[in-house]
Image: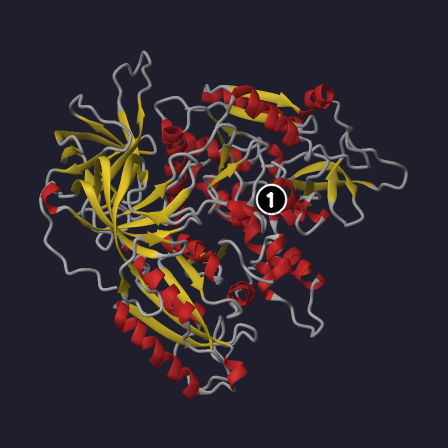
């Protein structure tokens, strides 16, 4: 009997497609939260594999902090266009105005925490019952404990002690009114798996993932932050021009660049095999605030 | 490269989290910034607390215990690994079940000073029940018993009894010290009398049960793709994952539970037509005839014989604080099929310490019970021992949506089989 040889990437892909189709089968109004980063771009490729030649059974939803890199916004629009899928954009700026929220202060004002309000508003506006995201368990310790189908209450809050047991690959998305589910199809992928998949599938990415010259501010920690009009710099700040790339693309005010000469996916994979600093550790200022930074934000409804 | 999923289980303070920390640490899988966080919390004794690599939640660090299943990932030149770290406390046994449901191998950790205890029996029983084939008896803290071979041998002999009672197929025993790194990644210089592999060497070489793919083909429909566009006005694709076995273009198939017959016209994987596809691939099947097929239906070759039944006998791991009593109505979720059901009888409960079966009329949190279920619509199932995919289901509370139990099909009413399967001896626990 003919058999098909599957390697680990095929298995991870099959698992993710299975999860996406369970979302389509179980929910009435799902959405795919699209950040423009490599993980959510990989998710759109997985969604193509899950649903073509049909349309995606969900729109792409982008929460625009207003601090995004322009390259990411351009890429987002062109990807949604080439996929011919619906894109919904909601701006943190509007949430701040409508809800009278306080703009974050400081030298590197991050709107990351405020995204949660916009996210909860858009969930309410469209009555989304499931939101698909590209989070991975290898990113962070609290994420390592989250289910693939993660039930959130009316306020989007995650209660790690009340998580449903998740048995086999049977996903229970049954919820009560007001609750919704966050779904993480690539939970079991590592950063390297995502890059290997991008390489294998030849998935285009925004340029900022590859080495380029950029004006950067040197932070006290030694990390490099791309220069932007959203930073409140003063005379003491050191501005340098460096050859850098981004490993993650969150809010530009809290996502650091790493020095690199990697100009292709192959180079990045080679870099990663040598890299000794984790993805979030290298680039996220927000997680370093406290050891439980992510858990606290998730409990409050963050992705 | 292949993939091995394993679970670590043991009692509280047996050193599970330390063992995983040691595996990650000694195989160079911990990044510098994470190490820096560990350094900040270095013990007064000067030792790094490796358990902090897995205990991720605030309450876990406060109480120094593992509450929830944590997933860790690492790769060696030989293999990719997914570790599930399951909690040891009795009240979190349901999380152990959760972890074991997706594992190929179980590491059962025993404290060399304590030997085999009730939790060892409980965890081995659960892992065995959930179909794990490969067991590692990891006798930890050998440094605290003077690295004595006689102590190790006694524990192995005690465990051997459990292995025989449960008919565990493959057991390997390894003496180690997670704290000192003896026999975890590197072989020990202290335990010179032990000639076997280190834990990692064993994990790298044990056969992956990928081939936990029984030959009987099973496919359940998750979603129907109907583009209804100008170019594809009549396209109808049945999307799902092959649960077991292999499917071929041209296979004569039946749709269950309706029993309608048709032919697979095409199999698509990633938008390309293929002649053959195998578990666990996600595929789209296109059928020759316009038959009624919807989410939750099972498509199998006419030569295959799943049980199609409204009466199922099953083993449950009850996971809810509210006890189960006979007569309770609930939902059975069998992958993409959800049907109403009622528990018609609770047959017996398994004493997890003695493995004896005792009569009961209720199932409490963490109990393992045998029940009879009656469903409103037929399910297409297999005996869990033959098919880990189609023999598994969960019970769900219709009102709250909570997951109540893990269910493993043990027997089905033979009169309702599509074609009767040969009788099997009763499960020996």
Question: Would residue B254 be seen by someone viewing this image from the given angle?
Answer: yes
- Indicate the chain on which mark 1 is placed: A
- Binning the other alpha carbons within 10 Å of mark 1 as few (below 14), some (14 to 19) or many (20 upward) gives some
Q: Residue furthest right?
A: A235
Nearer to us in this view, B2 or B147: B147
What's the residue at 78%, 37% (across, down)?
A: A108
Which coloring applies here?
secondary structure
Question: Would residue B76 be seen by someone viewing this image from the given angle?
Answer: no
- Asked if A214 appears above or below B166 in the picture, the reply is above
Residue B105 lies left or right of residue A245; in this view the side is: left
What's the residue at 90%, 38% (across, down)?
A: A235
Residue B135: quadrant of the picture: bottom left
- Asked if B236 appears above or below A202 in the picture, the reply is above
Q: Which residue is mark 1?
A: A262
Q: Quadrant of the C terminus of chain A?
A: top right
Residue A127 lies left or right of residue A255; in this view the side is: left
What's the residue at 77%, 32% (across, down)?
A: A104
Query: What is the number of callouts on the image?
Result: 1
x, y percent for residue A177:
48, 28
Residue A104 lies left or right of residue A71; in this view the side is: right
Nearer to us in this view, B292 or A204: B292
Residue A45: quadrant of the picture: top left
x, y percent for residue A8:
39, 49
x, y percent for residue A237:
85, 41
Nearer to us in this view, B110 or B202: B110
Nearer to us in this view, A157 or B207: A157
Q: Which secondary structure lies at badge 1?
A: loop
Residue B275: quadrant of the picture: top left
x, y percent for residue A288:
70, 48
């Amino acid at each position: 009997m003919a058999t098909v040889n599957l390697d680990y990437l095929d298995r991870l892909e099959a698992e993710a497609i299975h999860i996406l189709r369970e979302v389509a089968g179980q929910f009435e109004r799902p959405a795919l939260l699209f950040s423009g980063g490599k993980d959510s771009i990989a998710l759109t490729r997985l969604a193509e594999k899950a649903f073509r030649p049909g349309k995606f059974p969900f729109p792409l939803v982008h929460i625009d902090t207003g601090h995004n890199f322009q390259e990411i916004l351009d890429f987002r629009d062109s990807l949604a266009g080439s996929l011919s899928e619906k894109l919904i954009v909601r701006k943190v700026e509007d949430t701040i105005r409508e809800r009278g929220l306080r703009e974050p202060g400081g030298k590197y004002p991050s709107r990351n925490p405020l995204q949660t309000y916009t996210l909860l508003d858009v969930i309410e506006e469209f009555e989304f019952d499931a939101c698909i995201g590209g989070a991975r368990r290898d990113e962070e310790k609290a994420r390592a404990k989250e289910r693939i189908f993660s039930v959130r209450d009316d306020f989007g809050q995650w209660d790690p002690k009340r998580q449903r047991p998740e048995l086999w690959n049977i996903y229970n998305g049954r919820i009560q009114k007001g609750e919704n589910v966050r779904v993480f199809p690539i939970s079991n992928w590592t950063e390297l798996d995502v890059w290997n998949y991008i390489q294998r599938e030849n998935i285009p990415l925004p340029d900022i993932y590859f080495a380029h010259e950029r004006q950067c501010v040197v932070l006290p920690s030694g990390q490099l932050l791309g220069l932007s009009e959203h930073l409140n710099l003063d005379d003491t700040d050191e501005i340098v021009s460096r050859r850098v790339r981004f490993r993650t693309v969150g809010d530009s005010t809290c996502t650091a660049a790493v020095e690199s000469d990697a100009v292709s996916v192959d180079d990045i994979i080679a870099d990663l095999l040598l890299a000794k600093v984790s993805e979030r550790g290298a680039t996220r200022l927000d997680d370093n605030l406290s050891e439980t930074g992510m858990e606290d934000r998730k409990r409050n409804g963050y992705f | 490269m292949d993939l091995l999923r394993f679970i670590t289980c043991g009692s509280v303070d047996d050193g599970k989290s330390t063992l995983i920390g040691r595996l990650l640490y000694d195989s160079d899988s911990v990044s510098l910034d994470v190490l820096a966080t560990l350094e900040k919390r270095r013990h007064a004794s000067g030792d790094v607390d490796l358990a902090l690599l897995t205990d991720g939640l605030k309450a876990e660090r406060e109480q120094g215990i593992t509450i929830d299943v944590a997933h860790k990932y690492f790769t060696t030149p030989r293999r990719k690994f997914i570790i599930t770290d399951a909690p040891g406390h009795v009240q979190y046994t349901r999380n152990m079940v959760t972890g074991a449901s997706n594992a190929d191998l179980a590491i059962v950790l025993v404290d060399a000073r304590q030997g085999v205890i009730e939790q060892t029996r409980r965890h081995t029983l659960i892992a065995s029940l959930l179909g794990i084939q490969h067991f590692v008896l990891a006798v930890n803290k050998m440094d605290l018993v003077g690295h004595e071979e006689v102590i190790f041998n006694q524990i192995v002999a005690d465990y051997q009894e459990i292995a025989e009672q449960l008919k565990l197929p493959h057991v390997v025993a390894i003496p180690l010290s997670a704290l000192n790194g003896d026999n975890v990644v590197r072989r020990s210089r202290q335990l010179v009398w032990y000639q076997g592999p280190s834990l990692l060497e064993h994990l790298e070489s044990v056969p992956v049960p990928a081939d936990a793919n029984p030959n009987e083909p099973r496919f359940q429909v998750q979603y129907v793709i109907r583009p209804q566009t100008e170019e594809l006005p009549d396209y109808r694709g049945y999307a799902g994952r092959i649960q077991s076995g292999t499917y071929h273009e041209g296979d004569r198939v039946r749709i269950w539970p309706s029993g309608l017959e048709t032919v697979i016209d095409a199999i698509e994987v990633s938008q390309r037509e293929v002649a053959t596809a195998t578990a666990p691939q996600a595929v789209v099947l296109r059928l020759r005839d316009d038959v009624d097929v919807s989410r939750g239906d099972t498509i199998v070759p006419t030569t295959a014989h799943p049980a199609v039944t409204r009466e199922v006998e099953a083993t449950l791991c009850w996971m809810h604080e509210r006890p189960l009593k006979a007569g309770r109505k609930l939902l059975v979720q069998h992958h993409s099929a959800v049907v109403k059901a009622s528990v018609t009888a609770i047959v017996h409960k398994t004493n997890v310490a003695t493995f004896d079966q005792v009569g009961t009329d209720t199932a409490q949190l963490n109990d393992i019970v045998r029940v009879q279920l009656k469903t409103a619509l037929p399910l297409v199932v297999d005996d869990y021992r033959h098919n880990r995919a189609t023999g598994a289901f969960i019970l769900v509370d219709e009102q709250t949506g909570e997951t109540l139990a893990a269910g493993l099909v043990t027997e089905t009413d033979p009169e309702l089989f599509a074609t009767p399967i040969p009788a099997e001896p009763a499960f020996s626990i």
